Amino acid sequence: MTDLFGLTILELCYIAASITFIMGLKMLSSPDKARKGNLIAAYGMGIAIFATILFKEELTADKWVNYGLILTGLIVGTVFGTRMAMKVKMTAMPQMVSFFNGMGGACAAVISLVEFDHLLHTGKVETGMMVVIILGLIIGSVSFAGSIIAYGKLEGKIGDKALPGGQVINIVLLLAILGMAIVMAMADVPNETHMYILLGISLLYGVLFVLPIGGADMPVVISLLNSFTGMAAAFGGFLYGNQAMLTGGILVGSAGTILTVLMCTAMNRSLMNVIIGSFGGGGAGVAGKDGEQGTVKEISVTDAAILLAYANKVCVVPGYGLAVAQAQHTVHNLEKVLADKGVELNYAIHPVAGRMPGHMNVLLAEADVPYPKLQEMEDANDDMANTDVVLVIGANDVVNPAAENDPSSPIYGMPIIDVLKAKNVIVMKRSMGKGYAGIENELFFNDKNRMLFGDAKDSLEKLISEVKNL
Amino acid sequence: MQDLLSLFYENREFIFLIIVSIFLGIEVISNVPAVLHTPLMSGANAIHGVVVIGSIIIMLEAAPDNYFALILGFFAVVLGTLNVVGGFVVTNRMLEMFKKKEK
């Protein structure tokens, strides 16, 4: 222990850090202050980290290996973290966040492992501390395994795999985790084997929990795992009586949960459904109505350009396909070209379009699309009857009428952008492939709809030159 | 049981802090517009990287010959730092795009 002076400085630094976390989160909620908020929280974090190193324990010469390792770890993490974050493409941001989230979860799990080992050697067991260690281990490892699977899935390295009876397996695993945790908490002597078994089941649960989930549900999962890691960090704070870890972790835990709930509400799903891992239409059971398909009508680029140029009001519904094609700048150019022709173009943003909440907003912001042009789903739907042409770019499930009129559909009940209320619909798509939820979209067969096949960026560029020539 | 009761009593201030923080977390983000959902999630992700402090404490307390703690602790420091630094840098990159738009 250092002297009272050092410890006081440490606690003051933790108070300062906690304030920056609260301010940071608060400022992240307004567009003009968000960037500053992020920086403030980052400074607070830096203060907390260095204060811990300098003031937590008296620095002694015999621990130079420890200090060397701490500094090396900080440097290695900083170098790789910065490199990865700077190099990642806009479209890959969601999986990047998921990856970093997994790292935090792993960190929490490792802390629990070391503290458990510490208890093994001192032999002193308090039930309370044991419970906190166990909870940190479970939540940290579930968050780690789940985040890495989510990362792999969004990177396209891991496909949707639904095990037969996956739900039952998940419930059994959850019960096994619970049982093991109780056994360990009640035990008089800590048992190393039990701990590794618990670690194993928790990791397995994390994997199996995320593996079958597909479709528009991935944002919810990432958000949920994010709040998990927050909780794991908070348990760490409880373990060490560390206020900075506690406030930081709890804030993220509760804020992340609220964000998750908001997303669930937008998709009309319950959080319980998410946890059991049953949703997402990941199974093969989604037969759909393949038999009764009508015919699909195509539209040529020239016809599409004419339709757009002579419209008064055009609404773009962007989806993940826009992100994949990197067509955000091109669509903004189309908006400008149409504006010259006196056509008003707005964007209708579905809350779960893309692979993360706000994914489309970030993407369009990159292309300098002004905020007022981005309409939320409700406003866009109110305007739909006055809209001449809806241009659906790389979106599928968020405009699928089955969500409203087919109770057997896995996305039934999810609010959608009601594009059929508009006068004309053009769907730009690479092929007749299904959306991420893996279900058929009857919109494509509707009389009002025309398909414009091809890469979104390529098609948009052709549209722009056609419109210019009119 | 006695253990749990004493855990509660000894940590009552922390439990109080936890409950207040939960409500604070909910309150602070409740007015976030959908536009900022992704950066908010990313920023929150960076903040829970505060868990790295736990791994630093492990390293500070570990005896210089406790290789188990030193090795795992080192990995924990690396992982936690990745979370913190990567998280803040990614969030900053996202928000830079918003900043450009302000003009």
Image (tube, coloured by chain):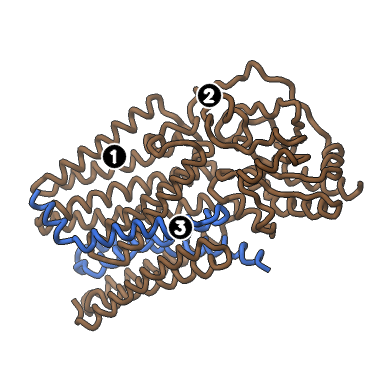
Instruction: Tell me the distance, in whole angstroms, between the alpha carbons under discs 3 and 2.
Output: 34 Å
Characterize the local packing of mark 3: few (<14), some (14-19) or many (20 or more) Cα atoms within 10 angstroms: many
Name which residue type carries label 3: Ile
- Residue B82 seen in the figure: no
Q: Is residue A391 above or below residue A55?
A: above
- In the picture, one chain is brown; tell me its letter: A
Chain label for disc 1: A
Residue B30 in the image: x percent, y percent?
46, 55
Q: For the point 34% across and 39% down, which residue is it? A: A204
**Which residue corresponds to mark 3?**
B29
User: Which residue occupies the foreground of this view, A346 or A62?
Assistant: A346
Please, what secondary structure does the residue beneath circle 2 have? loop
Name which residue type carries label 1: Ile
Instruction: Tell me the distance, in whole angstroms, between the alpha carbons under discs 1 and 2.
Output: 36 Å
- A93 relative position to B79: left or right: right
Tag of residue A201: 1
- In the picture, one chain is blue; tell me its letter: B
**Farthest residue toward the bottom?**
A5
Please, what secondary structure does the residue beneath circle 3 have? helix
Q: For the point 55% across and 43% down, which residue is it? A: A352
**Which residue corresponds to mark 2?**
A407
Q: Nearer the viewer, mark 3 or mark 1?
A: 3
